[in-house]
Image: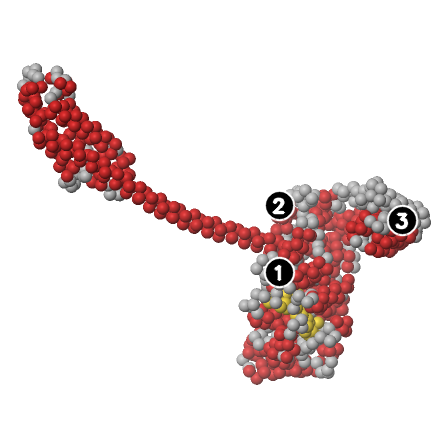
Amino acid sequence: MAEPLGLIGVVGVAVQLIQLSTEFGLDWKEAPAEASSLIHELQNLKTVLCETHINLLSNPDFVDAFCGRHSALLSEFDPLYETDTMAMVSTCKSELESLLEDLRKRMGGSRLGWGRLKGAFQASKTREAVENLYRKCLALNQLLQIDMAAMTASIHREVKEGRKEQQQQHQSQYRSLNHIRGRVDDEAARLEQETVLDWLTPIDYFPQQNDFFRRRQPGTGQWLLDSEEFQNWVTTKNQTLFCPGIPGAGKTILTSIVIDHLHTRFYDQPDVGIAYVYCNFRRHDEQNAGDLLASLLKQLAQQRSSLPDALSDLYSKHGLMKSRPSIEELSECLGSVSSEYSKVFIIVDALDECDASYRCRTSLLDELFNLQSATSVDANLFTTSRPISDIVQRFEGAPSLEIRASREDIERYLRGHIGELSSFVTRRQDLQEEIISAISDATDGMFLLAQLFFEFLKDKTSPTKVRKALTQLRDQSAGPGEDQKLKVLSLAYDQAMERINGQLDDHRHLATLVLSWITCAMRPLMTFELQQALAVEPGDTDFDEDNMPEVEDIVSVCAGLVTVEDESGIIRLVHYTTQDYFERKRQRWFPNAESDVSKICATYLSFWPFGTGPCCTYDDFRERVRLYPFYKYMADNWAHHTRKASCVSDEVLEFLLSREHTTAAGQFMQAVYYPCNDWGEFDNEPRMMQGIHLAAYFGLDKAIQLLLDEHQVNPNGCTSCHRTPLMFAAEEGRLAAVQVLLAADGVDVDVGDTFGETALYLAASNGHDAVMRALVDSGKVDVNAMSWHGTPLHIAAERGHESAVRLLLKTDEIDVNAKNEYGVTPLAVAAEKGHQAVVECLLAADGVEPATKNNRGWTPLHYAAQQRHTAIVQMLLAAGPFEPDYGDYSPYSWAVRWGDEAMIQALVDAGHGVPDS
């Protein structure tokens, strides 16, 4: 830092010299030229030095500005170095001090004039020192300019570097923000994809695939993969390979091998799509044609990097409306997503287990064949099935390959499991080979038999007994043909059940309960669900976790007839033929299975924690489900088991008589599907649901009779929405329950619920003709009772229930022209919905008035034209005259909007519209 003390000293001396005249009473104006000139120079020097000292050398802002930088000006005053400036300052100060001393001596205390002092100012050294220092100060100004220029350049450089650094920081921040934004966008896209895919279907076949594939022995099915038929299928465009096989041939395991082979072969080709489904006879409720197509669509959509537009559009159309897409929409979307791949492989296992009713199997195959015929899609189809004639016919002309368990595959399985037999077998190689050879000979291509025969040997205690068992197997397996093999399979099941019944009592009882539950269950059960069911005993008041058997014990006591899918956690029978066997022989092995299951369900639903009734909040409801995970199954299915039971048990009756327990179960039945109402509030409607309502809903006529006769339950008791037991029974088509309730004393047949809907209206809405007949024949109903939406005839016409419409039209009191609150007639409703047969039926009814107008002046003709039901428009025009309407929403204007030439011509011919318009 510069040293300013020298400058201050010079300034101090200069000030004393300037003030000297005042001190001695002299006036500088009268001073001689030499003195006046020096004093003038001193005044200039003082000013420069003061400004330099104050504004520069002692200014902290100026000094700090050069902190870390070189300053030409400040370096001249650096005390660490001897500079010319500091020397001049020192010299000037000395000369001025000498001048001041000389002047003081000359004055000598007397008042003298300038003449006596003149000589002191003639010293050249003083003048020279002052002039040199003054010139030096002027030179310092140049140094200051240099400093300023350097400072400007330095600041420019720093600003530039700062801008660069700031730009780099901004770029880094921008990249970070883009990265974060990208992650947020990716997460949002992922969540959107999960939402859409879960909406499409919650079913995931991946756990089943993993489980089936894990069960195979390495090398199994290689014959199939190496076959010419399979190789051609993989490489040929739009190829189909149909693989029929006898029951138990191992079709499902081979299917899992095919799927794994495709994934391995095309894992690095994202433009190849693979989708599959495993049909299961126990999953008909979740495996209709639409469900299966949705599963295939979901898998192909999952394999894309982003959600396909076609699926997004489908969700936008149905997701928010909580509606489901039609089979046609799903098929169209499947085709659109498939076209995004260069090739698609679709695998359907066990097509024979796909429900043949309601055209499920037919519809599925129709849509898959249509997909193959699309020009923009290369789709290969692989299917397995039992050789059922109608399925075989659908694949006529397509390449096929019969599935049979090869001897090599069976031997692989046996060698892989031989260690599970008694130790005397594992110690003798000859006995192992004898077992493998005998079982392979006896199974003749039926893999399931090999499993059952192997299980048959597990309890044998000596080589002799093993050989006797093998001889027995050979004898009962003699004879060719599928029918013979099925007989052998049935005998194998008989032997398994005999082994089960030969166990200790507790083991036999556990096995009987396990098989009863699995065979009677309305859907596949998870292991934890079955464990909970087995832990409950009649008379229990709460769940006893310590009474749950271990899964290993459950499997071991069943002699190989049940298996656990490790991935999904489902416990099931080893094969669908096992279910067929128990269906045929249930009366022999466990005749009271449905009754026993029904008792356990009622006991579970009657646990004391549920005695508090329904939950008040959704959080409480979810907590109840968490603590009692099997409650869902019990509430959904107790009545199905009770209906199949031989009688109504005391446990069931006790449950139905407890209002708190029945309302809790009723809440669960509804809340599990519709947890919240339209306002997002938890729905407490089931608070008023009593046992007789549940019994009526499920059609438990025997239970209803007991409640009415022995416990004097009110047949007209209402729920919170004013539904009576008769309404529930009528809506669900429970004829026997309806008949019991109609016979009850004081039953009100014609009462309406909150919406004015009567039992007859509800029966008509679902087309339950037999129930409608029973209600009409009772003579207690008003067939024209008006609800918010109309009469029973309105709803039957709207839903297209032709037989229900005919039944109502046969009643003498029917008003065929009845109007609802909007002035709409049943004919107008049927015309709008396009139910041609119903329209024809109504037009033929006595007293019908086809041209009746609603509150806005529309006739049935308007509705038919608006919805483009051309045939119905023609039928209505033929039925009678309609007043022409030339408004913007006339039938003719709708026909023109549609561009329907046939409809336009029909209207013009009938005098509606202008031909030249």
The residue nearer to you, when weighing 49 against 552, is: 49
Label whose residue precedes the other's in the sequence (3 or 1): 1
Q: Residue at x 85, y 48 (%)?
A: 913
Residue 911, disc: 3
Crowding near the residue tagged with mark 1, few <14, some 14–19, many ≥20 C-alpha atoms within 10 Å:
many
Q: Secondary structure at mark 3?
A: loop
Percent of width and height locating residue 361: 74, 66
Tell me the CA gap for discs 1 and 2.
34 Å
Tell me the CA gap for discs 3 and 2.
64 Å
Q: Nearer the viewer, mark 3 or mark 1?
A: 3
816 vs 203: above or below: above
Q: Are marks 1 and 2 in contact (CB under 8 Å)?
A: no
The residue nearer to you, when weighing 572 against 88, is: 88
Percent of width and height locating residue 811: 92, 49
The quarter in which the N terminus is drawn is: top left
Residue matched to label 1: 301
327 lies left or right of 166: right
Q: Residue at x 65, y 57 (%)?
A: 310
Residue matched to label 2: 619
Crowding near the residue tagged with mark 2, few <14, some 14–19, many ≥20 C-alpha atoms within 10 Å:
few
Percent of width and height locating residue 445: 67, 79
Q: Secondary structure at mark 1?
A: helix
Label whose residue precedes the other's in the sequence (3 or 2): 2
